[in-house]
Image: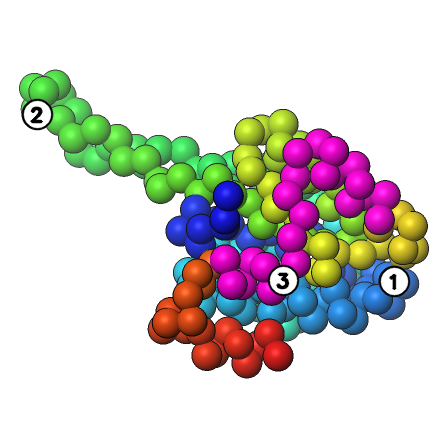
Amino acid sequence: MLLDFEESQLVLVDYQEKLMPAIFDGEQALRNATTLARIARLLQVPVFGTEQNPSKLGPNAQELRSLCDKTLSKMFFSAVPEGLNEWLRPPAKPQGGNARSLPKHLQKPQQQAPERNSIVIAGCEAHVCLLQTALELLEDEFEVWVVTDACSSRTERNRDAAFDRLAGAGAELVTTEMVAFEWLRSCEHEDFREVLQWIK
């Protein structure tokens, strides 16, 4: 099963200014997350960020934050209890006008937003906020794709333990390049050359 950009959403978890210096290989994780966000914006894939206790840990790195459609401030380690899943699966739009003005068979059905059930997710710390968010999204019946080279923790061991647990729970483990080329599918895609520059 390949990722489809039209069915995807990107979630970037807690790349916060005060946290990143303590993260193992944090610069590379942030660089890959920023590349993912740029590609997502180019392909019109929704991009959401989260920030854990931003009054203490600060905002996400500015370049990354500016690429997000919305950023969720949270106190729970998982972003799901704070409402992330409601952003990812918006309710049907309410019907406009007076519903009683037309017979039922002539009324338009409520418009459902197009389903984007594949959640591409990356973040810090992999064994805490990323892990808990991804596990709860799996419980909520989303497909979860964890971008391993855009994730990290303060220690390599914690990061790797998170990947083992996520794979066991049913998440797909991928890399930034895997996501990019699956979203594009072909070297004939109109955005291929631009994406290639960011990957290089």
Assign a secondary structure to mark 3.
helix
The residue lying toward the viewer, choosing from 117 and 4, is 4
Task: Tell me the CA gap for discs 3 and 2.
Answer: 47 Å
- Near mark 2 (Cα within 10 A), the count class, few <14, some 14-19 or many ≥20, is few
**Based on the displayed image, in which of its 4 quarters is residue 112 positioned?**
top left
Quickly name the residue at label 3: 176
Quickly name the residue at label 2: 106
Query: In this picture, which residue range is highlighted in magenta?
Result: 160-182
Task: Tell me the CA gap for discs 2 and 1.
Answer: 60 Å
Q: Say if residue 161 shows up in the picture.
A: yes
Dot 3 or dot 2, earlier in sequence? 2
Q: Amino acid at mark 1?
A: Phe
Q: Where's the C terminus, which quadrant?
A: bottom right
Q: Is residue 175 magenta?
A: yes
Quickly name the residue at label 1: 24
Dot 3 or dot 1, earlier in sequence? 1
Assign a secondary structure to mark 2.
helix
